[in-house]
Image: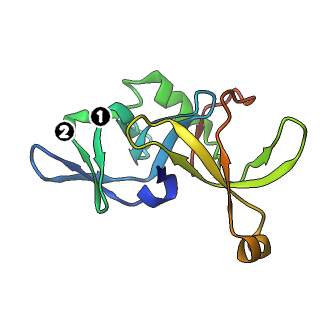
Amino acid sequence: MIKGKEILGKNVVAINTGQRVDSVRDVVFDHQANQVLGLLVDEGGWFRAARVVPFEHIRSFGEDAIMIGDAGDLTTTREDGRLAEVLESKTSLIGMTLLTTDGQDLGKIADVLFDEHTGRVEGYEATGGLFSDLSNGRTFVPAPRACRSGLTRRLFR
């Protein structure tokens, strides 16, 4: 499993050229499907679309870089409506409160752990706050089979 925060800032490298394509700025996540959709490498701007590495184009998550086949594996939000919708929401999972179906507060989401081969979210790292983290550490909360939130979200911003 990989923690989402561990890949922020890592270089994305094309295998065919060995060249750095960009670096990871955020993880694009579909909360409803418990699935990582891709890695945001460029936020975009007024006259250019955001650029994303779709999860299916990631060859491997290395210690120092994330490998893709070639630079053409990146897509833009103009080409992928689902990614555009997520990035337009500007909603972050980090800091959201985790509640059980019976109303027990498990803490706030501090990170998301996902399978590096499938992109499936395996669980969340929950924080109870600074003092709780120092005394008890953070808690791993397995991802539910079905989520109640219908929103698709960005992970960190």
Height in image: 130 above or below 58? below
The label shown at residue 136 is none
Tell me where residue 73 appears, x and y as whole percent. 25, 34
Secondary structure of the residue carrying tag 1 is helix
* Residue that appears at 43% across and 43% down: 45
Label drawn at residue 69: 2
As drawn, is 105 to the left or to the right of 73?
right
The amino acid type found where label 2 is placed reads Gly
Name the spot of residue 76 as percent of width and height, x first.
36, 32
Q: Is residue 130 left or right of residue 20?
A: right
Cα distance, mark 2 to mark 1?
7 Å
Of residue 72 and residue 67, the one placed in the foreground of this image is: 67
Q: Secondary structure at mark 2?
A: loop
Mark 1 = which residue? 57
- First in sequence, mark 2 or 1: give its number: 1
Q: Point out the residue furthest to the left here.
A: 17
User: From the viewer's perspective, is 132 left or right of 64?
Assistant: right
Q: Are marks 2 and 1 in contact (CB under 8 Å)?
A: yes
Visual colour scheme:
rainbow
Count of numbered badges drawn on the protein: 2
100 or 96, which lies in front? 100
Residue at left offset 78%, top offset 71%: 132
Q: Quadrant of residue 72?
A: top left
Residue placed at 34% from the left, 31% from the top?
A: 56
Identify which amino acid the numbered label 1 is placed on.
His
Q: Residue furthest right?
A: 103
Q: Residues within 10 Å of mark 1 (few under 14, many from 20)?
A: some
User: Where residue 139 sits: x, y (%)?
Assistant: 69, 59
Residue 93 is situated, as x and y percent measured from the top left of the image, at 65, 46
